[in-house]
Image: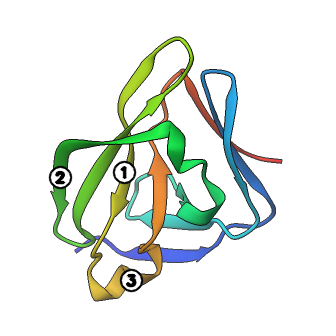
Amino acid sequence: MDHITIRKAAGTWTVRAGGAVLGESDAALELVEGDYPPVIYFPRSDIAMAFLDATDKTSHCPHKGDASYFSVVTKSTTLENVVWSYEEPKEAVAQIKDYVAFHKVDEVTVEQI
């Protein structure tokens, strides 16, 4: 099993897509899993969820559980399946329930401000 560490992400974080700010949070979490780069998880309450459309895509992680995906709808395009969430995460990572994370793609920027 990969070692997973979850902690409060230091400072304030923002996420942008298609030129629009989707969210800003000082309550973001940083998840580190094995040798993978850290992933920032945003509380749903700090994200403009109206820009996210749930999709049929799912995936399974043996350590975190089943992930659901969202597309981001911008003025000019739809960024398919670039957001994920664990609706019912495994107990070991229960802190990420009600949080979303964003794939690192050119059209999406996650950064500390």
Residue found 45% across the figure and 41% down from its top: 52
* Residue picked out by circle 2: 59
Question: Where residue 84 is drawn, which disc sits there?
Answer: 1
71 is higher (above) or lower (below) than 76: below
Q: Nearer the viewer, residue 95 or 69?
A: 69
Q: Tell me which numbered mark, 3 or 1, is placed earlier along the sequence.
A: 1
Q: Quadrant of the N terminus?
A: bottom left
Out of 16 and 11, give the one closest to the viewer.
16
Q: CA distance from mark 2 to mark 1?
A: 9 Å
Which amino acid does the dot numbered 3 rest on?
A: Ala
Which residue position holds label 3?
Answer: 94
Rate crowding at label 2 as few (under 14), some (14 to 19) or many (20 or more) other CA atoms within 10 Å: few
Q: Residue at x 76, y 66 (%)?
A: 26
- Please say if 41 is above or below 71: below
- Which corner quadrant of the image does residue 82 belong to? top left
Q: Nearer the viewer, residue 67 or 70?
A: 70
Residue 106 location, x and y as percent? 53, 21
Mark yes or no: residue 92 visible. Answer: yes
* SS assignment at label 3: helix
Position of residue 68 relative to residue 56, above or below, is below
Q: Earlier in the sequence, mark 3 or mark 2?
A: 2
Q: Residues within 10 Å of mark 1 (few under 14, many from 20)?
A: many
Q: Are marks 3 and 2 in contact (CB under 8 Å)?
A: no
Secondary structure of the residue carrying tag 1 is: strand
- Decide: marks 2, 1 in contact (CB < 8 A)? yes
* Residue 40 image position (x, y, % from top left): 56, 56
Q: Amino acid at mark 1?
A: Trp
Q: Is residue 43 visible to the viewer in this orientation of the structure?
A: no
Q: Mark 3 to mark 2: distance in Å? A: 17 Å
**Residue placed at 79% from the left, 58% from the top?**
12
